[in-house]
Image: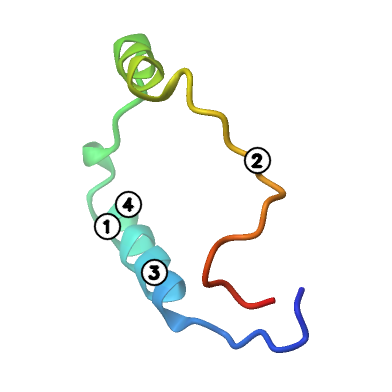
Amino acid sequence: MPTNYEHDPIPDGFLSLLENDIQTTPQRLKAVTPELVARIEGLVGEVKIDLDAPIPGSFT
């Protein structure tokens, strides 16, 4: 982790919101269907992403 990293509270808040929603209304959860996977792959199937590449504008 970079030494000049500052904690960003936004993801924590979002994850807490999701956690609360899952706990209070678990019936809303739905499995990812093969059709959804196929649709996503059709949209981004040829996009190459380097997970190790730096994010523009990120802390370095």
Label 3 SS: helix
Q: CA distance from mark 3 to mark 2?
A: 29 Å
Q: CA distance from mark 4 to mark 1?
A: 4 Å
Residue 3 is situated, as x and y percent measured from the top left of the image, at 77, 86
Residue 11 is situated, as x and y percent measured from the top left of the image, at 44, 70
Question: At x 35% / y 14%, what residue is drawn?
Answer: 42
CB-based contact (under 8 Å), mark 4 and mark 1: yes
Foreground residue among 16 and 37 = 37
Q: CA distance from mark 2 to mark 1?
A: 32 Å
The label number, if any, that marks residue 16 in the structure image:
3
Label 4 SS: helix
- Quadrant position of the N terminus in the picture: bottom right
Quarter-of-image position of residue 45: top left
Label 2 SS: loop
Question: At x 57% / y 85%, what residue is drawn?
Answer: 7
The amino acid at mark 1 is Asp
Residue under label 2: 50
Query: From the viewer's perspective, is 36 left or right of 10?
Result: left
Quarter-of-image position of residue 14: bottom left
Residue under label 4: 22
CB-based contact (under 8 Å), mark 3 and mark 2: no
Query: From the viewer's perspective, is 22 left or right of 7?
Result: left
- Location of residue 55 with respect to 40 vertically, above or below: below
Label 1 SS: helix
Residue under label 1: 21
